[in-house]
Image (cartoon, coloured by chain):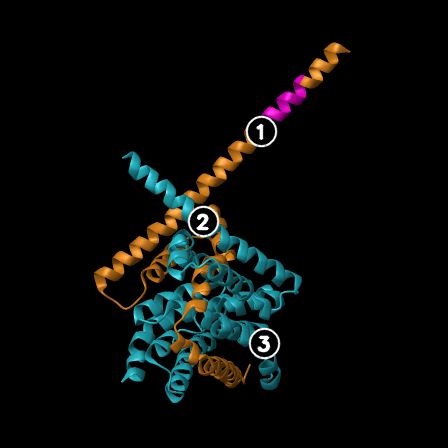
Chain colours: A orange, B cyan
């Protein structure tokens, strides 16, 4: 009985040890993959900023980085899974990154606040207008379909 | 060396609670949004931002201190803009024989969205900073911020303008689709992506994967197209 208990305890301990080690290794591996994917994205951002500096165009550096990354991703049949996961994670939490800037809307100057009714009117009218325009445009273009 | 490390450590400690404040405000906003069944008027930023602003006002903290403390969060916007290439590349490969309609809609839709907003701004006599800050209102926020920075507009204003554009857009879009007889989910998705960026895309994915896929294409291509023509277009409205 004592032997059985010891064996059981030993098996359990061994299992726990393996599970712990596997879990830790998995966490470290995931962390490293995330960091590596983030560095790829940052690398393309820097590359984009360098290209923009070189050609002197009006385009934003990270946007140029996005266009540059689009080339290998479109050519490759299987995009890197870890890059996909990291990108999804960043895009899913995009709203959180805007929080500092969104808070700034409550610290704008009095002059801007006075124009807020006009800003709201512009947003409502132009948004309704462009949706209506595109809907009619598509109807016209796909009439024969 | 030790004093430098101490200074760095104090800086981390003093700013980390500000990042925590952003995360906590966002978490509250997200909770309200989910409890409200995903109602666009309860967007996490619309709920969380006034809470954080209220806390800052109560503690007598200026926006500059808060913004500097959240430098890490703001820094992530750069790599996230680059990350948009991943979903965009997946959708680009699936493009069927609708390339003509799609291209014309993106080119004209993106252009008309900016021209309409800028014309109305001139008509209503808004100031130059406002004019520069609403030009990219239909573009997804990370790209809109880049464009606005380039144009010299207010980043704090464009974020709110983009957010309100998305919310108003998804509220009115269904009625306009019914009115004009747009029933094809591909076109509904494309229009939502061009006019209402990421908020429209999230709404499109609620309809179907196909609708969401076309919305992603519309959002991504409009971001690229707008950043190409807006710097030249804005000059015509400033003259």
From the image, tell me which residue sits under label 2: A83
Instruction: Specify whether residue A14 is painted magenta.
Output: yes
Callout 3: few (<14), some (14-19), or many (20+) C-alpha neighbours within 10 Å?
A: some
Q: Is the magenta stretch mostly helix, strand or loop?
A: helix
- Judging from the image, mark 2 belongs to the subunit labelled A
Q: In what element is the residue under mark 2?
A: helix
For the C terminus of chain A, give its image quadrant: bottom right
Callout 2: few (<14), some (14-19), or many (20+) C-alpha neighbours within 10 Å?
A: many
Looking at the image, which is closer to me, B131 or B53? B53
Q: In what element is the residue under mark 1?
A: helix
- Judging from the image, mark 3 belongs to the subunit labelled B
- Which numbered disc covers residue B171? 3
Marks 3, 1 in one chain: no
**Looking at the image, which residue is at 57% across and 55% down?**
B27
From the image, tell me which residue sits under label 1: A20
Q: Position of residue A36 (x, y in %)?
A: 40, 43
Farthest-out residue, bottom: B123
Of callouts 2 and 1, the N-terminal one:
1
CA–CA distance between discs 3 and 1? 49 Å
Say whether marks 2 and 1 touch (CB < 8 Å): no
Q: In what element is the residue under mark 3?
A: helix
**Looking at the image, which residue is at 58% across and 65% down?**
B205
Range of residues picked out in magenta = A10-19
**Looking at the image, which residue is at 39% across and 89% down?**
B123
- Left or right, A18 with reference to A65: right
- Judging from the image, mark 1 belongs to the subunit labelled A
CA–CA distance between discs 2 and 1? 26 Å
Q: Where is residue B120 in the image (x, y as percent from the top left)?
A: 41, 86
- Left or right, A13 with reference to A79: right
Is residue A90 visible in the rendered image? The answer is yes
Instruction: Specify whether residue B69 is painted magenta.
Output: no
């Amino acid at each position: 009985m004592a032997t059985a208990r010891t064996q059981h305890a030993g098996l359990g301990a061994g299992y726990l040890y393996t599970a712990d080690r596997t879990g830790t290794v998995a966490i470290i591996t995931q962390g490293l993959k995330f960091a590596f994917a983030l560095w790829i994205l940052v690398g393309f951002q820097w590359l984009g900023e360098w290209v923009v500096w070189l050609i002197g165009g009006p385009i934003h550096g990270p946007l140029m980085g996005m266009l540059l990354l689009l080339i290998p991703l479109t050519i490759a049949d299987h995009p890197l899974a870890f890059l996909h996961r990291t990108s999804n994670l960043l895009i899913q939490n995009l709203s959180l990154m805007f929080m500092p800037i969104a808070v700034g809307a409550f610290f704008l100057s009095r002059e801007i606040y006075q124009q807020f009714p006009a800003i709201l009117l512009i947003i409502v009218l132009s948004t309704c207008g462009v949706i209506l325009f595109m809907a009619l445009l598509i109807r016209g273009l796909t009439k024969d379909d | 060396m030790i004093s430098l490390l101490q200074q760095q450590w104090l800086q981390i400690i003093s700013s980390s609670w500000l990042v925590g404040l952003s995360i906590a405000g966002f978490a509250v906003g997200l909770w309200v949004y989910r409890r409200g069944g995903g109602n666009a008027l309860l967007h996490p930023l619309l709920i969380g931002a006034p809470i954080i602003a209220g806390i800052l006002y109560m503690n007598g903290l200026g926006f500059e201190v808060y913004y500097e403390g959240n430098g890490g969060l703001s820094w992530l916007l750069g790599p996230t803009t680059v990350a948009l290439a991943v979903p965009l590349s997946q959708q680009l490969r699936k493009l069927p024989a609708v390339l003509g309609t799609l291209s014309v809609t993106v080119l004209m839709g993106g252009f008309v969205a900016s021209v309409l907003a800028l014309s109305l701004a001139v008509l209503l006599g808004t100031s130059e900073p406002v004019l520069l800050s609403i030009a990219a209102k239909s573009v997804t926020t990370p790209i809109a911020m880049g464009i606005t920075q380039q144009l010299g507009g207010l980043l704090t204003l464009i974020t709110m303008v983009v957010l309100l554009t998305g919310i108003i857009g998804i509220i009115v879009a269904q009625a306009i689709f019914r009115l004009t007889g747009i029933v094809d989910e591909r076109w509904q998705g494309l229009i939502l992506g061009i006019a209402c960026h990421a908020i429209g895309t999230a709404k499109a994915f609620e309809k179907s994967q196909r609708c969401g896929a076309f919305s992603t294409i519309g959002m991504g291509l409009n971001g690229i197209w707008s950043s190409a023509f807006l710097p030249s277009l804005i000059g015509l409205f400033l003259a």
